[in-house]
Image (spheres, grey):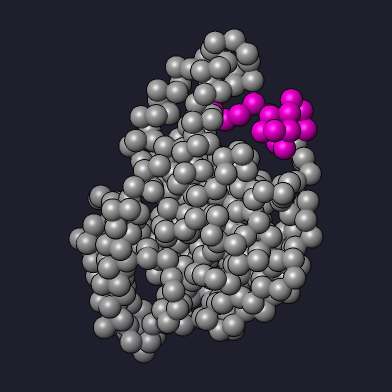
C-alpha cells in the first residue's frame, strides 16, 4: 500500500537540494573553529548558510544564532527575558512565559507589555498578522517559508526558526535577534556563535538549513503556496459537502495556506488518526510537540471549545509536492470512515 504524507506542519519532507548539499558537506573535514585551511572551509559553509538564511528571512546575518532547534532558541531567549504569552503558544514558549494574554474565539491574541506571540499556530494554521508587532519574541516556525514575511518589517525583536519545517534537516534551528537585543548565554564553552551559544556547530544541519531557506524563498516567489492553498480549500469543500456538522477552525480568519484543522464533535481525533493511518494517510491530532502523546487540544480549549470538540480535532497539513489526487483520496477515505461513524452513532 502506498503511503500519503499529510503532516507537513510536524515535519516537511527533506528537499532533494538539501540532501545533495548535506552529502557534499560530509566530505568537509575541518572544525569551523580551526584556523587552518580545512577549518576555514568548514567555517565558510557555516557563514554561507547564515547569509542564505538572512537573505530569505530578511534579517541581519549577525543576528542569527544557530541552535539545535526552535525549542532551544526559545529557551535561550526567554531565560534572558521575562515575557507574557497566550495559551495557544508552543509548549517551549509556555514553559517560560506567563500565559495571561487574552485570546478571542477566532484564535487572535492581544499582545500587551513584554510579550511573545507566534506568527501562526501549528494546529489551526491561524495567523496573527499585525498582532505580532511589538513582540519581544515571535515563533515564526510555521510562517517562514509559507508566507511572504521579512524579519525587518515584522516589527519584532527576535524570532524562532526551525529547519525541518521548511524541508531542511531535523535537529537545527535558529534564534534571530534585532539590533540592540542580546541574550544571556546558557551553553558556555568555546564561545562559538559570537559567545552566545557554545559548542561545535552542526555543520551538516546548518548547511541544510541554509539551502532549505534559499529554496523555500524561491517557492514563495514562484507562487507555489497559493496552489497549495487551493488544494486545501478543495479538500475542505469536499469534506464539508458530506460532513455538514464538521467544524473547520480558523476558516473565517487568515490561515496558513496548507493547514486544515477540523472536528466532528464526538468522533475522537486519535481514532481518526489511527483509521487514516491504516488507510495509508499520515495526519495528526494536533501539534507534534508532545512526544507522540495525544491530548485534548489546549489551543482549541483556549479558543473556547469544550473538551469533546477539542479532543475530536484532526489536522491535515500539506505541502508543495502534495498532489490533488492525494488530497482528494484522503477526503474520500475520511468521508467513508465518517459515514461509518455516523451510522454507528445513530
Residue 265: x percent and y percent? Answer: 46, 82
Residue 166: x percent and y percent? Answer: 43, 48
Give me the residue at 30% from left, 63% from top. 226
* Placement of 317 over or under 214, stated as above or below: below
The answer, for residue 51, to whether it is visible in the render is yes
- Magenta segment's dominant SS is loop
Nearer to me, 238 or 30? 30
Is residue 51 magenta-colored? Answer: no
Residue 283: x percent and y percent? Answer: 40, 60
Q: Quadrant of residue 263?
A: bottom left
* Residues rendered magenta in the picture: 188-203
Does residue 86 appear to the left or right of 245 in the view shown? right
* Placement of 164 over or under 274, stated as above or below: above
Nearer to me, 180 or 47? 180
Q: In which quarter of the image is residue 229?
A: bottom left
Give me the residue at 50% from left, 50% from top. 58
Q: How many labels does the image show?
A: 0
Is residue 195 magenta-colored? Answer: yes
Q: Quadrant of residue 115?
A: bottom right
Amino acid at each position: 500500500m502506498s503511503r500519503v504524507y499529510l503532516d507537513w506542519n510536524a515535519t516537511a519532507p527533506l528537499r532533494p537540494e538539501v540532501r545533495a548539499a548535506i552529502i557534499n558537506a560530509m566530505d568537509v573535514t575541518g572544525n569551523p573553529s580551526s584556523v587552518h585551511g580545512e577549518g576555514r572551509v568548514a567555517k565558510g559553509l557555516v557563514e554561507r548558510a547564515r547569509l542564505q538564511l538572512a537573505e530569505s528571512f530578511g534579517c541581519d546575518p549577525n543576528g542569527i544564532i544557530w541552535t539545535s532547534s526552535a525549542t532551544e532558541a526559545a529557551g535561550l531567549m526567554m531565560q534572558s527575558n521575562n515575557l507574557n504569552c497566550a495559551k495557544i503558544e508552543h509548549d517551549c514558549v509556555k514553559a517560560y512565559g506567563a500565559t495571561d494574554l487574552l485570546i478571542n474565539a477566532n484564535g487572535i491574541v492581544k499582545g500587551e507589555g513584554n510579550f511573545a506571540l507566534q506568527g501562526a499556530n501549528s494546529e489551526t494554521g491561524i495567523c496573527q498578522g499585525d498582532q505580532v508587532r511589538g513582540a519581544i519574541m515571535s515563533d515564526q516556525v510555521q510562517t517562514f517559508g509559507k508566507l511572504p514575511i521579512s524579519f525587518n518589517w515584522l516589527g519584532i525583536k527576535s524570532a524562532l526558526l526551525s529547519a525541518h519545517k521548511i524541508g531542511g534537516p531535523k535537529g537545527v534551528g535558529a534564534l534571530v535577534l534585532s539590533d540592540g537585543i542580546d541574550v544571556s548565554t546558557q551553553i558556555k564553552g568555546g564561545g562559538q556563535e559570537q559567545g552566545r551559544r557554545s559548542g561545535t556547530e552542526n555543520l551538516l544541519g546548518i548547511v541544510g538549513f541554509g539551502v532549505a531557506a534559499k529554496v523555500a524563498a524561491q517557492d514563495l516567489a514562484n507562487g507555489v503556496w497559493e496552489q497549495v492553498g487551493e488544494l486545501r480549500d478543495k479538500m475542505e469543500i469536499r469534506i464539508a459537502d458530506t460532513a455538514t456538522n464538521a467544524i473547520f477552525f480558523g476558516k473565517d480568519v487568515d490561515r496558513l495556506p496548507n493547514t486544515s484543522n477540523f472536528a466532528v464533535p464526538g468522533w475522537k481525533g486519535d481514532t481518526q488518526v489511527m483509521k487514516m493511518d491504516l488507510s495509508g494517510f499520515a495526519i495528526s491530532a494536533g501539534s507534534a510537540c508532545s512526544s507522540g502523546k495525544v491530548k485534548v487540544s489546549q489551543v482549541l480549549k483556549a479558543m473556547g471549545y469544550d473538551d469533546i470538540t477539542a479532543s475530536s480535532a484532526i489536522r491535515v497539513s500539506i505541502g508543495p509536492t502534495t498532489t490533488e489526487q492525494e488530497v482528494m483520496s484522503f477526503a474520500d477515505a475520511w468521508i467513508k470512515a465518517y459515514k461509518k461513524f455516523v451510522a454507528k452513532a445513530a
